Image (cartoon, grey):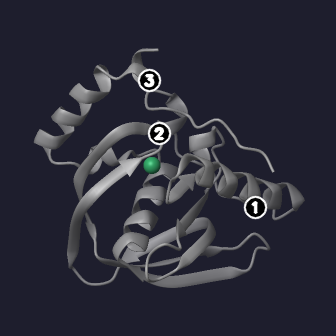
Amino acid sequence: MTIRDIRMFGDPVLTTRSDEITEFDDALRALVDDMLETMDHAGGVGLAANQIGLTRRIFVYDCSHTEDGLRGHIINPVWEAIGEQTQTGQEGCLSIPDISMDTERFETVRVSGRDVDGHPVAMVASGLMSRCIQHETDHLDGVLFLKRLSPELRKEAMATIRTSDWFNS
Ligand code: ZN
C-alpha cells in the first residue's frame, strides 16, 4: 500500500468530472487500499479519487468512529435524497486544509454503486455518513464543498484560503 499525495484547492483535477469505472481488476483493488491508507494518514472521513489526481468515480469513507460504524468504498456512486429534511453542520475537506464551515446537506440519502468486485451495493445513510456521501460524490462531479456554502461563509472561506501558507507555497 502507498500513501498518495493529496491534491490541494486550485488544482484543476478537483474541478474535473471523473469518469465511470468499467474495469474491476487488481489495479482497482490496489487503488482502494491506497485510498483508504491515504485517508487514514490524513485523518479524513472520506477521500475521492480525484483528490489523489485520478479522475475515476470512486471514493472511500470511514465513519467507523460514529454509531453507524461504516468504513469502505463505493464505485460509480449515485445518490438520491430520502425526504426533504436537511442537516447543517461543520464540514471540511482534505484538499482545503484548516477550513471548517457550516454546510447544509440532506439528512438522509440512498446511495447505490458497485464494490471493488463489480457487485452492486446500496445503502441508506443519515448524519455524517450521509454528509460524506454527498461531499464525496460532489468531488467526483468536480464540485468542492465551498460551492455549497452560503455566500457569506464562502467569502470568509476564500479569504482564509488566500492567506493560507499551503495555498501560497
Ligand atoms: Zn473533500
60 on left or right of 80 = right
Looking at the image, tell me whether mark 3 or mark 1 is earlier in sequence order. Answer: 1
The quadrant where residue 28 appears: bottom right
Q: Secondary structure at mark 1?
A: loop
Instruction: State the count of labels.
Output: 3
Q: Position of residue 143 (x, y in %)?
A: 40, 46
Nearer the viewer's eye, disc 2 or disc 1? 2
Q: Position of residue 85 (x, y in %)?
A: 20, 79
How crowded is the residue under tag 3: few (<14 C-alpha within 10 Å), some, or many (20+)? Answer: few
Residue type, numbered disc 2: Ser
Amino acid type assigned to the residue bearing label 1 in the image = Thr
Label 3 to label 1, Cα distance in Å?
A: 35 Å
Q: State whether label 2 is within 8 Å of ligand 1.
A: yes
Q: Which residue is mark 1?
A: 22
Q: Nearer the viewer, residue 31 or 66?
A: 66
Q: Which residue is mark 2?
A: 95
What residue is shown at x 70% (from left), y 73% (from top)?
115
Looking at the picture, does residue 7 appear above or below residue 54?
above
Q: Quick one: SS at disc 3?
A: helix
Kindly indicate whether the residue at mark 1 contacts the one at mark 3 (C-beta within 8 angstroms): no
Q: Residue at x 51, y 84 (%)?
A: 123
Cα gap from disc 2 to disc 3, whole angstroms: 10 Å
Q: How many C-alpha atoms fall within 10 Å of the one at disc 1: few (<14), some, or many (≥20)?
A: few
Name the residue located 31 percent from the left edge and 27 percent from the top edge: 161
Mark with earlier residue (2, 1): 1
Disc 3 residue: CB within 8 Å of ligand 1: no
Query: Residue 4's x, y, as percent?
Result: 69, 40
